[in-house]
Amino acid sequence: MTDLIKGVKKPLRLGRGISYILLVTSKDVIHSFSIPDLGIKIDAIPGRINRIVKKFDRYGVFVGYCTELCGAGHRYMPIVAEIVDSSVFADKVANVPKTVKKK
């Protein structure tokens, strides 16, 4: 399990006790974004944006997977979410640029 967690390049880092709107889509085929221990399961469909509103009350590292058989790379699609103290999270967010550059 540790290797799996370390293998995810960009884990989802979220602050505990903060409500989030998660927007999910896909650019290729149907996927299903699932982290069972956090109560998340939402389809990612090309051309459509699905949303889920969640507030996380537990600290920890949680692992999920794409639960839709989506092609040859399906088994290599782990999802990792880390729920951290909201004050630590706020410090990290403060250092993120406020504007998004368009491509």
Image: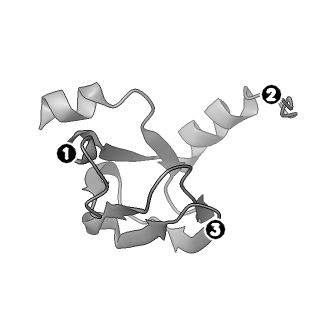
Q: Amino acid at mark 2?
A: Pro
Q: Read off the residue under disc 3.
A: 48
- Left or right placement of residue 3 versus residue 13 in this view: left
Q: For mark 1, give the secondary structure.
A: helix
* x and y percentages locating residue 16 in the rendered image: 49, 56
User: In the picture, residue 48 is in which quadrant?
Assistant: bottom right
Tally of numbered discs = 3
Q: Is residue 26 above or below residue 17?
A: above
Alpha-carbon distance for marks 2 and 3?
A: 27 Å
The figure's colour scheme reads: one colour
Q: Is residue 32 above or below residue 9?
A: below
Q: Earlier in the sequence, mark 2 or mark 1?
A: 1
* x and y percentages locating residue 85 in the rendered image: 48, 46
Instruction: Report the residue that reaches farthest toward the left.
Output: 1
How crowded pointer 3 is (Cα within 10 Å; few <14, some 14-19, many 20+) is rated as few
How crowded pointer 1 is (Cα within 10 Å; few <14, some 14-19, many 20+) is rated as few
How crowded pointer 2 is (Cα within 10 Å; few <14, some 14-19, many 20+) is rated as few
Closer to the camera in the image, 19 or 65: 65
- Left or right placement of residue 93 versus residue 102 in this view: left
Closer to the camera in the image, 69 or 11: 69
Q: Earlier in the sequence, mark 2 or mark 3?
A: 3
Q: Could you tell me which residue is drawn at 27 percent across and 26 percent down?
A: 7
Q: Which mark is residue 57?
A: none
Q: Indicate which label's residue lies in the foreground, 2 or 3.
A: 3
Q: Amino acid at mark 3?
A: Arg
Q: Could you tell me which residue is drawn at 15 percent across and 27 percent down?
A: 3
Q: Amino acid at mark 1?
A: Arg
Q: Which mark is residue 97?
A: 2
* x and y percentages locating residue 83 in the rendered image: 42, 49
Q: Read off the residue under disc 1.
A: 75
Q: For mark 3, give the secondary structure.
A: loop
- Quadrant, the C terminus: top right
